[in-house]
């Protein structure tokens, strides 16, 4: 099978770039810790309200962990609990969320906080809020007729 | 003898079978296009749907009718045509199986359509369990898949017959390609068939109470990603085999074209988890492995790009073109059969770059489920693929109906392609931009309680409505051209362009060793999916009951 000289150069260059690219995202993920949210913990979706930490949604200061706060959300059609929360500027926050009914998509617009909520699973992501202002939390996965009304707010404030 | 064979028209009876598929495909274009127009108008905030029609109902229509019906029917009609043309007229038995396939698919489409219209199935074509549609919706879509398997059987049977009659010879290139796409489709649809038949159907009929949501999603996306390659490969068939003939050039390399199709067969399927990068329950290491496998399709894509432009340059130079880019001037820019698919090829450059971003593991968090993604696949599927399909229709429809594409229709077809491009530039461009600002996809118009961030998205949504309206004009033009070519164009002989390779080098026979390729395909799938599935099943949370929240 004949391969043209230019095509060999083109493919060699292409494959080399691909390797560089995959190495970069691999190092970012597994050495620097920038993995996409992939929490493996499960929960009974019918009993979310009675189980910690989801029995008390909202912001909680924690000690002795890599993060300063835990921000717990419970999603259900078509609302988030809590509906509004204040986060101190610069805080390192672990967002922990789950759903009581169908699939929802937890997204804080204008940030990289974006994760799927699936019934029976807990989703987590650690983020630092390093810009003040009001952030819209919305649902980005179709969940029913009120999908586009589902929202919450995060206010990042100087303290 | 080969030369004579290339002049032969597709048999009238096979032509009728293919045309039946095209009628449904273009009806789907009309219905789905209208739904798309309405969606962009609703999201502009200036328009509300009348008569209690729901936004998510028309969104379901748009996805099912364009993503599944238009594509599957068009592709089956096209593949049957090219196989009949290059591997020989179908036998009566093969044609009968094709007709049964057509009617099974059509029945399924009608069933699913009725359930969507009755508002019993506003779950989008991606299902979204534990949202629970009426069982007939799932049955309808199952029939569409089963019918497509019957159509696929026709192609497999014809291929086997040709190989038996021509021992030791490489099959006709485009028949080979149609076979690869058919095999890929059959292996991929097993996933969606499994979630529907083993999970969703028993659950929607009330035979079981709960469903394992994560397993259902993983099975769906096992199918959902190769689905997009199933749309793309017929466009590649046209780019590799048909476009060279239309411009008067040659296929750059028969062997490399086959190799790239084999690579697509191997690397299209074990990659579905890259649609689930932000989901809980799947280990990030397995997500990363599937990301690597996803990126391997970069190789056949680069091969394809090289081949196409080598064909163009070779042709231009053979016509005396000088300088680095002089050959560009020699291409037939006034021929709709060339320029409309060519626009599709160009759109695939930004589309492919966007796809690389989407699949880039952690970078997916920036764009996942934002309308950026919608902008992305309106460049891949709704421009690269669809404009190529239109480019095929311009000569294939008149070829099958014994008519010709007139100069006037050719001109209108170019206007159609350009109108589409303008509309899509507005719509897809605005979608990409709004998505980067955080605007979600699959969402009706919302001001999110007066949020300042959401207010920033609205000008882009108006731009999407402008683009959507221009696109709808292009759709009307396309439907007009289709009706003309099917029923009113002057009688005559429209050429069925099938290119020939530049050199007479025989392609290596290893490409036709299906035990080998299907074997590797299955091994790769088992490698990529076995551990994630065991995890999802062994560590499964309590199942979910069904919800009807629309």
Image (spheres, rainbow, N blue to C red):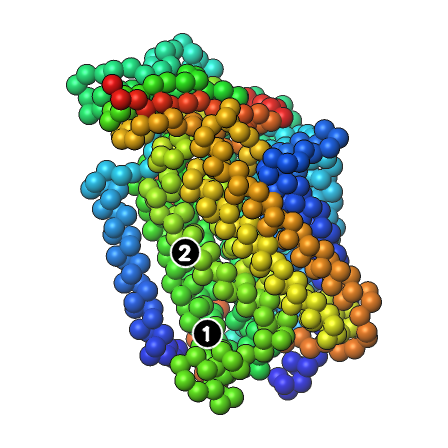
Q: Is residue A62 at all visible to an observer of this figure?
A: yes
Considering only vertical position in the picture, is B169 above or below B93? below
Residue position for label 2? B353
Q: Quadrant where the N terminus of chain B lies?
A: bottom right
Tell me if B120 is positioned left or right of A65 in this view: right
Mark 2, secondary structure of its residue? helix
Q: Which x, y percent locates residue B178?
A: 57, 64
Q: What residue is drawn where x is 37% and y is 18%? A: A85
Mark 1, secondary structure of its residue? helix
Residue B309: which disc? 1
| Chain letter, disc 1 residue | B
Q: Quadrant of residue A147?
A: top right
Q: What residue is drawn where x is 67% and y is 33%? A: B48
Q: Which x, y percent locates residue A13?
A: 29, 67
Tell me if B478 is positioned left or right of A147 in this view: right
Q: CA distance from mark 1 to mark 2?
A: 18 Å
Q: What residue is drawn where x is 50% and y is 26%? A: B450
In the displayed image of the protein, which residue is found farthest to the left?
A64
């Amino acid at each position: 099978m004949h391969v043209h000289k230019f095509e060999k150069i083109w493919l060699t260059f292409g494959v080399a770039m691909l390797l560089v690219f995959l190495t970069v995202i691999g190092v970012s993920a597994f050495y620097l810790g920038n993995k996409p949210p992939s929490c493996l913990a499960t929960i009974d979706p019918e009993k979310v309200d009675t189980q910690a930490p989801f029995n008390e949604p909202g912001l909680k200061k924690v000690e002795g962990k890599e993060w300063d706060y835990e921000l717990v959300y419970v999603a259900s059609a078509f609302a988030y609990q809590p509906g509004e929360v204040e986060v101190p500027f610069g805080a390192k926050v672990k967002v922990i969320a789950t759903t009581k009914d169908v699939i929802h998509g937890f997204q804080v617009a204008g940030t990289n906080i974006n994760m799927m909520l699936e019934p029976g699973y807990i989703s987590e992501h650690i983020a630092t809020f390093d810009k003040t202002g009001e952030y819209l939390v919305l649902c980005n996965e179709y969940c029913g007729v009120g999908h586009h009304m589902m929202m919450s707010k995060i206010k990042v404030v100087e303290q | 003898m080969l030369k004579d064979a290339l002049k032969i028209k597709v048999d009238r009876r096979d032509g009728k079978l293919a045309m039946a598929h095209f009628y449904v495909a273009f009806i789907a274009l009309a219905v789905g296009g209208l739904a798309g127009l309405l969606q962009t108008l609703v999201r502009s905030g200036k328009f509300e749907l009348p008569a209690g029609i729901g936004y998510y109902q028309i969104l379901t229509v748009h996805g099912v009718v364009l993503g599944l019906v238009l594509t599957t029917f068009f592709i089956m009609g096209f593949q049957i045509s090219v196989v009949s043309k290059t591997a020989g007229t179908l036998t009566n038995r093969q044609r009968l199986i094709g007709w049964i396939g057509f009617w099974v698919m059509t029945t399924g489409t009608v069933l699913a359509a009725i359930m969507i219209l009755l508002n019993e199935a506003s779950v989008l074509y991606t299902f979204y369990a534990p949202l629970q549609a009426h069982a007939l919706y799932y049955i309808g879509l199952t029939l569409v898949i089963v019918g497509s398997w019957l159509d696929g059987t026709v192609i497999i049977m014809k291929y086997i017959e040709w190989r038996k009659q021509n021992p030791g010879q490489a099959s006709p290139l485009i028949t080979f390609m149609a076979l690869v796409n058919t095999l890929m489709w059959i292996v991929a649809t097993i996933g969606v068939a499994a979630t529907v038949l083993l999970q969703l159907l028993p659950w929607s009929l009330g035979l079981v109470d709960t469903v394992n949501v994560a397993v259902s999603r993983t099975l769906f996306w096992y199918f959902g990603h190769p689905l997009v390659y199933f749309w793309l490969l017929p466009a590649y068939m046209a780019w590799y085999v048909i476009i060279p003939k239309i411009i008067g050039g040659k296929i750059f390399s028969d062997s490399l074209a086959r190799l790239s199709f084999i690579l697509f067969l191997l690397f299209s399927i074990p990659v579905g988890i890259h649609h689930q990068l932000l989901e809980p329950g799947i280990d990030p290491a397995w997500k990363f492995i599937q990301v690597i496998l996803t990126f391997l399709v970069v190789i056949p894509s680069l091969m394809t790009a090289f081949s196409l432009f080598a064909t163009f340059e070779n042709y231009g130079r053979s016509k005396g073109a000088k300088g680095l880019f002089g050959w560009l001037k020699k291409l037939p820019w006034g021929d709709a059969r060339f320029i409309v698919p060519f626009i599709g090829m160009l759109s695939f450059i930004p589309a492919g770059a966007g796809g690389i971003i989407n699949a880039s593991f952690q970078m997916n968090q920036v764009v996942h489920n934002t309308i950026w993604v919608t902008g992305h696949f309106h460049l891949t599927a709704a421009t690269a693929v669809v404009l190529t399909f239109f480019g095929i229709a311009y000569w294939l429809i008149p070829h099958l109906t014994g008519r010709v594409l007139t100069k006037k229709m050719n001109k209108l077809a170019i206007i159609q392609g350009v109108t589409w491009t303008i509309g899509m530039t507005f719509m897809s461009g605005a979608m990409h931009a709004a998505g980067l600002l955080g605007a979600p996809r699959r969402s009706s118009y919302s001001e999110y309680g007066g949020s300042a961030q959401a207010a920033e998205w609205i000008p882009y949504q108006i731009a999407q409505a402008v683009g959507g309206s221009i696109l709808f004009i292009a759709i009307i033009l396309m439907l007009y051209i289709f009706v003309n070519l099917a029923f009113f164009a002057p009688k005559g002989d429209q050429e069925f362009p099938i290119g020939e390779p530049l050199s007479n080098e025989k392609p290596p026979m290893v490409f036709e060793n299906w035990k080998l390729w299907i074997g590797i395909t299955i091994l790769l799938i088992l490698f990529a999916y076995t551990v994630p599935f065991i995890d999802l099943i062994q560590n499964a949370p309590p199942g979910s009951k069904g919800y009807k929240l629309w």
